[in-house]
Amino acid sequence: MQYRIQLSAAMAEQLGDVITVELSQEIVTIADIRKRLHEQYPEVASQLQGSFFTRHKRLASPDELILPSDAIALLQSAPGMETVISKCGLFAITYDPIDADEVASKVQEPSHGASLTFSGTTREYTQGQRTVLLEYEAYVPMAMNTMKQIGDEIAERWPSTRTAMTHRLGTVRIGETSVVIAVSAAHRDTCYEASRHAIERLKQIVPIWKKEVWEDGSEWKGHQLGGWNPHNAQ
């Protein structure tokens, strides 16, 4: 039986957006798929070590049973090609430039006396190496879910706060904005704490990857906190 697996980021550049593997046994698990990929594509073995599978847009455990009809993705990411906005309107992923004022307007509340807007931009030099641009990709369905989860965490930890965030995908050049997070609260101390929590958790659990393009090469990177691990979201 054949199983289709969606790829992206560095592996998609090497192998294509979708690959097919064939297994003869009747019962197949995620671990079986991973083993077959190691055998079939040894050139990406090092990338497979740090990857995670999803089944129907949810994290899949190694012993999870799968069918040929299942939607399987390998995280590294699967990009969405249009703006995706949560039902509550507070969380968005887009390929367009981000309007920080528009994001900030989502958290305005008459009862709140403090608001903060954090903007992350592409810097020119990192550890002495000149960056030309960054390219972002995301596993969009899971990214949207985890962004909303961050908002729920903040609301539970700091009641009455309001959080909005928008992340950009695609090419982000020097000085351009890749992420905007806005938080409002009744008091400034809560606002500072909630804003910091939002950006740190985004780096921990939201499946967004960046490719650094330098003057003399490029490399897919994780976030500053190290390798992305979806288990941190649980």
Image: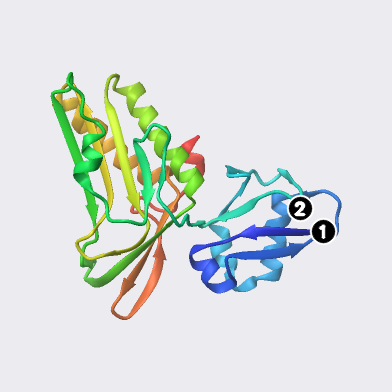
Residue at 16% x, 26% y: name it: 189
The reply to whether dot 2 and dot 1 touch (C-beta < 8 Å) is yes
Residue at 26% x, 70% y: name it: 131
Quarter of the rendering occupied by the N terminus:
bottom right
Side (left or right) of 67 relative to 111: right
Q: Which residue matches tag 1?
A: 1
In the rendered image, residue 140, in percent from the top left (x then y), is placed at 47, 49
Label 2 Cα crowd, 10 Å radius (few <14 / some 14-19 / many 20+): some
Quarter of the figure with residue 107: top left
Residue at 34% x, 35% y: name it: 90
Please state which amino acid type lies under the numbered disc 2: Pro
Residue at 37% x, 52% y: name it: 94
For mark 2, give the secondary structure: loop
Task: Examine the rendering and report whether any part of residue 106 can be seen.
Answer: yes
Quarter of the figure with residue 146: top left
CA separation in Å, label 2 and label 1:
7 Å
Task: Examine the rendering and report whether any part of residue 229 can be seen.
Answer: no
Label 1 Cα crowd, 10 Å radius (few <14 / some 14-19 / many 20+): few
Label drawn at residue 68: 2
In the rendered image, residue 96, in percent from the top left (x then y), is placed at 32, 56
Q: Is residue 19 above or below residue 91?
A: below
Q: If you read the primary sequence from the N terminus, does the residue marked by circle 2 or circle 1 appear first?
A: 1
Please state which amino acid type lies under the numbered disc 1: Met
